[in-house]
Amino acid sequence: MNSNKEDKMHEMIDAYINDMMSLKDKLSFESRMEADEILKEEVFIYMSLKESFNEKDWHTLDKRSHGEALQNIKKELKSATLQNVSINVKKAEEEYYNVINKKLNKRKKFYFVAIAASFLLFASINLPYLLGNDSLEDHYNNYADWEGIPSLIEKGDEVAIIEKLYESKDYNAITSHYEIMQNGSETFHAYSLLKVGASYFFNGNYNEALQVFDVFIQLDTIASSRGNWYKLLVYLKQDNKRKTQETLNVILSNKNNYNYKQALKIKKDLK
């Protein structure tokens, strides 16, 4: 990708995550993300970076001047062995921090370290695992990725409450908050629903977790297929073979579905 095209792409991503696009442009951009894994990866990195800065610092960052260094970081991380994420983080810091020390101020140093960490987080979520045996419980242990539930770009009151409670693992408080809002016919943000479902799951309330994930799927957003993946984790944990196979078939019906490759590995291993 040449420099002008890359700059334009970054401008579009910035406009998207800051809700500066028209509805038509936003829908068009989301359609592009569905078909373009590289673009989806870029958006993920920008979302993670924005979470790392306050609003003032985010808008004063120079996001275009060091595009070549950004690409070098990604190339190095992609070529490294992803079996040990901690080694990759250490390697990225050692190889790039010296360069950053010479060329960038403190704020931009943190920007590039955040990029490296964000990319590794994305890679680790999708890291393939070797399966030790045919137990559904073991498949659950190998593929569970509850920490992969995204944080929100824009945090309103409801979202901020759920984020804080989830980080502190106060799952009872999350489910209670959800039930209170449901009784008042309040609407939950899509990604907050995933954390509500996960909270029910961690409390052992599997049926309630499945119901919440179904609500998320029915929202029919660009990320709806995540709901099926988390339902699969519940069925694996329950050792429910029939529901596991049914949910695997749903995920495998579309190669663009979340964690399609991981679902395919599980399907093959269970035969």
Image (tube, rainbow, N blue to C red):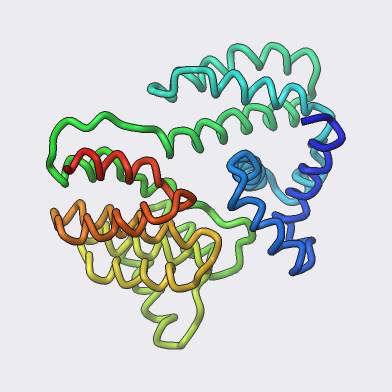
- Residue in the foreground of this view, choosing between 39 and 119: 39
Residue shown at the point (29%, 67%) measured from the top left:
210
- Image location (x, y in percent) of residue 155: 61, 62
Q: In this view, does 236 lie above or below 118?
A: below
- Residue in the foreground of this view, choosing between 195 and 28: 28
* Quadrant of the drawing holding the N terminus: top right
- Image location (x, y in percent) of residue 160: 54, 62
Q: In this view, does 78 lie above or below 36?
A: above
- Image location (x, y in percent) of residue 96: 65, 16
- Residue in the foreground of this view, choosing between 19 and 55: 19
Identify the image quadrant of residue 75: top right
* Quadrant of the drawing holding the C terminus: top left
Tell me: 202 left or right of 108: left
Q: Is residue 155 above or below residue 52?
A: below
Q: Residue furthest bottom?
A: 184
Identify the image quadrant of residue 157: bottom right
Residue shown at the point (40%, 46%) measured from the top left:
260
